[in-house]
Image (spheres, rainbow, N blue to C red):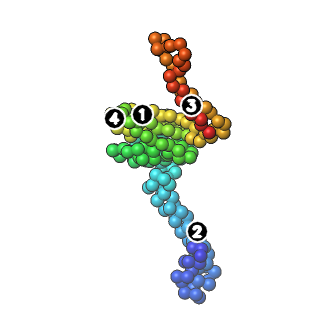
């Protein structure tokens, strides 16, 4: 139902049929639709995920610098990253933050046992905004941890051929005797 029909439903039938009233309603309906669009547009600026021209205000509020090469999505990702940067950060939060800058979410964050660091594995095909990913990790990671950003191919490797591995232990020179084999052990493993 259009705005014109909606407005004319509020009037008595004889009054809505008048030519003058129809002209007034058609003009007012257009104005009401324009006002409604403006209200929706302003409401969209209140949320980072839907803001367009209001992103400048968000950047000023959150003290985020805008770069000339950034598109709307990149600006939104940077702002969302800034407001969602709430300590303490666990590996899932770090993965979500890194995945915001990737085309296909492929980040995997894993703690390296026995070391004060973690690894961030990212599919090499998705790696476009390295500087922003590093900046995000530096802002979110705990101060006592280091990290290693490892771009990799996240594909499985299938071995189609047979591979034979030999583990041989040889005798030392002083252990050599006539009639004994040169090797102590000869372990063979076949991988298929």
Q: Nearer the viewer, mark 4 or mark 1?
A: 1
Residue 189: x and y, percent? Answer: 56, 33
Q: Which residue is mark 4?
A: 143
Which disc, if any, is residue 147? 1
Q: Nearer the viewer, mark 1 or mark 3?
A: 3
Q: Which residue is mark 3?
A: 188
Residue extending furthest bottom? 14
Q: Describe the element under mark 2 as helix, strand or loop.
A: helix
Q: Which residue is mark 2?
A: 30
The residue carrying pointer 4 sits among few (fewer than 14), some (14 to 19) or many (20 or more) residues within 10 Å by Cα, namely few
Question: Which numbered disc, 2 or 4, marks the residue that appears first in the sequence?
Answer: 2
Q: Residue at x 52, y 82 (%)?
A: 10
Q: Residue at x 59, y 42 (%)?
A: 156
Q: Nearer the viewer, mark 3 or mark 4?
A: 3
Residue 40: x and y, percent? Answer: 50, 62
Q: Describe the element under mark 1 as helix, strand or loop.
A: strand
Q: CA distance from mark 2 to mark 1?
A: 58 Å
Q: CA distance from mark 1 to mark 3?
A: 38 Å
The residue carrying pointer 1 sits among few (fewer than 14), some (14 to 19) or many (20 or more) residues within 10 Å by Cα, namely some
């Amino acid at each position: 139902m259009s705005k014109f029909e909606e407005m004319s439903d509020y009037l008595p039938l004889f009054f809505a049929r008048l030519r003058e009233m129809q002209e007034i309603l058609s003009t007012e309906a257009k104005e009401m639709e324009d006002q409604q669009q403006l209200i929706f547009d302003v409401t969209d600026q209140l949320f980072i995920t839907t803001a367009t021209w209001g992103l400048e205000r968000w950047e000023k509020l959150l003290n985020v610098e805008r770069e000339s090469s950034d598109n709307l999505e990149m600006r939104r990702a940077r702002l969302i990253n800034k407001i969602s940067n709430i300590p303490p950060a666990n590996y899932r939060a770090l993965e979500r933050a890194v995945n915001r800058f990737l085309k296909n979410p492929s980040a995997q964050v894993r703690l390296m046992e026995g070391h004060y660091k973690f690894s961030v594995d990212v599919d090499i095909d998705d790696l476009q905004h390295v500087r922003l990913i590093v900046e995000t990790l530096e802002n979110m990671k705990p101060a006592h941890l280091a990290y290693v950003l490892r771009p990799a191919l996240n594909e499985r490797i299938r071995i189609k051929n047979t591979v034979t591995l030999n583990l041989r232990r040889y005798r030392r020179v002083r252990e050599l005797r006539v009639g004994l084999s040169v090797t102590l052990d000869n372990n063979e493993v076949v991988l298929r």
